[in-house]
Structure formats: structure tokens, C-alpha cells
Image: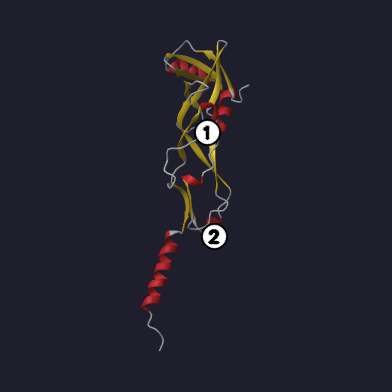
């Protein structure tokens, strides 16, 4: 049995901005499913079902329309200007046995001792490209920063990727590091320069 969330959709016969607006007023979101050399199909989903799934970050779903079920990936979600309401979203058909190449978000866990000590946490990437079987696609990749001290970094090679999940990024690429605040660096340099300029006591 699949552990992926299920989206039961209804066919959407009317197209256009006006029709989509009326649909959203009823508590449903318009969408399209495409891929695998099949025709694109317009549908709608009840927001009470769709929104909780989107909030979890889950990407792979079991999509059902007119009694037919297939695997799909949530491909694109369009929000309103203030990111409060979903305007439209797309699904991409996939086969349970195929591999996918997608971006997966990084989720930081813990509190860095280096930040507590006055450092600044800098994150160079908020997601990474991964390659894996679609049924192994993670919702997110956790990065534990609870031991990250001032001046230390977390590289791609430090990530604990789930089974059968790989990334094309170089192992040595820095993803997260804790740096000394610029003012602190300048102060240390000034103190060092003053120390060098002070004549030695006779």
C-alpha cells in the first residue's frame, strides 16, 4: 500500500480566469496534470485536502480522477500576491519505477553553538538537486547544526541522504557556515595592528 497522500480530483470543464475565480470561491483549487505523452487534463481539488499536503512539503501523491489512479509529483504551485491563497497548481505524471531529478529543500535542525557565541549563520543553498527513484523522493533533507561552532562549515559530503538518494553537487561545496560578524573581524584586525605599532617596552 502506498504511503503517499491521496488527491481525489473532479474534472474541470470550464477554462479561463473567470471560471477559475468562481471555482476558488467554492473552496476548490484548479489544476492540471500532464506528462508521459498523455493529454493534459484540467481538474479541481478541495482545498481542505490540498493545503495540508502542501504544508507538509510532500511532493509525490496518488492522484485519482474518475476512478483512475496514478502517481504524480506536485510540480508547480502558484500563490496569490500575498502568498495566502493558491491560484493554481500542476501535477506531473510519473511511474513508480522511474527516477526523478528535482530540487529538495534543506531543513536546519538544532541551534548552532557558534551562533549563540555571536557568530552569523550563512546558508548558501536552501535546496539541493537530487536524483532518486520517485518512491524514495524525500519531502526535505534535514541538516543538523547543533554542533556547528564559530568558523566551521557543513559541506555536501556531511549530509545524511536517505537510501537511494544522490546529489550532483561537489562533495566539498559549502552549504552552511558560521562566520564572525564583520565588525568583530575589523575590531580584531585593528587590535592586532595597534599591537604591532606599539613600541616594545625597554
Foreground residue, 199 or 86?
199
Location of the N terminus by quadrant is top right
- Disc ID at residue 164: 1
Mark 1 vs 2, N-terminal side: 2
Res. 113 image quadrant: bottom right
Identify the residue position indicated by label 2 in the image. 117
Horizontal placement of 186 versus 70: left or right? Answer: left
Element at badge 2?
A: loop
Q: Residues within 10 Å of mark 1 (few under 14, many from 20)?
A: few
Res. 57 image quadrant: top right
Q: Nearer the viewer, mark 1 or mark 2?
A: 1
Q: Residue at x 50, y 15 (%)?
A: 43
Spot occupied by residue 87 in the image (x, y as percentages of width and height): 47, 24
Contact, mark 1 vs mark 2 (Cβ under 8 Å): no
Q: Residues within 10 Å of mark 2 (few under 14, many from 20)?
A: few
Residue 79 visible somewhere in the drawing: no
Residue 176 visible somewhere in the drawing: yes
Mark-to-mark CA distance, 1 and 2: 37 Å
Location of the C terminus by quadrant is bottom left
Spot occupied by residue 168 in the image (x, y as percentages of width and height): 42, 38
Foreground residue, 101 or 11?
101
- Disc ID at residue 82: none
Q: Residue at x 55, y 49 (%)?
A: 145
Spot occupied by residue 17 in the image (x, y as percentages of width and height): 43, 18
Amino acid at each position: 500500500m502506498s504511503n503517499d497522500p491521496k488527491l481525489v480530483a473532479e474534472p474541470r470543464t470550464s477554462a479561463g480566469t473567470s471560471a477559475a475565480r468562481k471555482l476558488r470561491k467554492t473552496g476548490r483549487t484548479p489544476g492540471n496534470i500532464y506528462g508521459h505523452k498523455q493529454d493534459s487534463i484540467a481538474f479541481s481539488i478541495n482545498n481542505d485536502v490540498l493545503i495540508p499536503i502542501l504544508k507538509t512539503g510532500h511532493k509525490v501523491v496518488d492522484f485519482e480522477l474518475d476512478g483512475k489512479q496514478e502517481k504524480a509529483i506536485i510540480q508547480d504551485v502558484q500563490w496569490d500576491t500575498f502568498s495566502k491563497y493558491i491560484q493554481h497548481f500542476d501535477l506531473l505524471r510519473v511511474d513508480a519505477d522511474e527516477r526523478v531529478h528535482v530540487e529538495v529543500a534543506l531543513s536546519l535542525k538544532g541551534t548552532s553553538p557558534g551562533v549563540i557565541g555571536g557568530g552569523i549563520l550563512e546558508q548558501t543553498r536552501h535546496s539541493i538537486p537530487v536524483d532518486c527513484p520517485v518512491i524514495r523522493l524525500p519531502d526535505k533533507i534535514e541538516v543538523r547544526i547543533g554542533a556547528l561552532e564559530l568558523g566551521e562549515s557543513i559541506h555536501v559530503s556531511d549530509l545524511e541522504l536517505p537510501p537511494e538518494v544522490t546529489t550532483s553537487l561537489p562533495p566539498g561545496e559549502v552549504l552552511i557556515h558560521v562566520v564572525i560578524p564583520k565588525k568583530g573581524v575589523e575590531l580584531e584586525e585593528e587590535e592586532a595592528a595597534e599591537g604591532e605599532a606599539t613600541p616594545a617596552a625597554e
